[in-house]
Amino acid sequence: MRTPAGRECPHYYEDFHRGRAVQECRLVAGHAHSLRWRPEDCARCPVPAILQANASPSMRLTLIIRKRWLGWFGRKLEVRAWCTVHDVPIQNPYLGCPQDAADNDALRLFREALEKTDD
C-alpha cells in the first residue's frame, strides 16, 4: 500500500472507506518499547528501501520509534532484522542474512564467475 510519504510499503495500512479513518504501521503495532506511530514517520522510514533492496522471505523486520536526545529533537526510527531460517539477527538488513547468501546456489555461481573473470 502507498504510504503518506508516497512510497510502497506492505506494512502500512489505511482504511478511509465509509467514514473510517484508520492509518497504522503494522511493524510498530504492539511493540512495548516503541512510541506511537504517526503518519509523518513514513517520510523517514527506511523499511521500504530495505524491502526494495532485499526481499528475502526469511527476514523479519521490527520498527522501534524512540525519542531523540532527551525527547526534544524529533524521533528516531530503529529497524531490527531477524533471519527466521537461521535464527540469528541480521546486522545489515539491506544485504540480508550472510548465511542465506552462503546457502544460495545462484549467488555461489555468480561469485565463482566473478572469480574466473578476475584471473
Image (cartoon, helix red, strand yellow):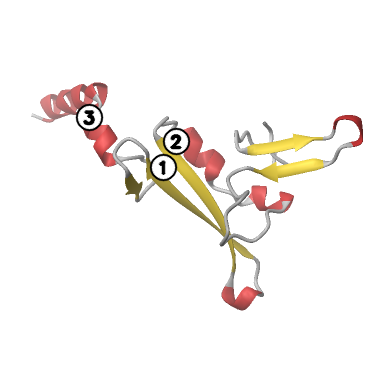
Percent coordinates x, y for residue 114 in the rendering: 18, 27
Q: What residue does disc 3 label?
A: 103
Left/right placement of residue 108 relative to residue 62 reads: left
Percent coordinates x, y for residue 11 in the rendering: 60, 38
Q: Quadrant of the N terminus?
A: top right
- Alpha carbon distance from label 2 to label 1: 6 Å
In the rendered image of this protein, does residue 33 appear above or below residue 86? below
Q: What residue does disc 2 label?
A: 53
Residue farthest along the left direction in this orientation = 119
Taking the spot 68% from the left edge, 57% from the top edge, the residue there is: 36
**SS class, disc 3:** helix
Disc 1 vs disc 3: which is toward the camera? 3
Say which of 107 and 70 sits in front: 70
Taking the spot 11% from the left edge, 25% from the top edge, the residue there is: 116
Q: What residue does disc 1 label?
A: 94
In the image, what residue type sits under mark 2? Ala
Say which of 31 and 5 sits in front: 31
Quadrant in which residue 111 is drawn: top left
Q: Mark 2 or mark 3, which is nearer the start of the sequence?
A: 2
Q: Residue 20, which numbered label?
A: none
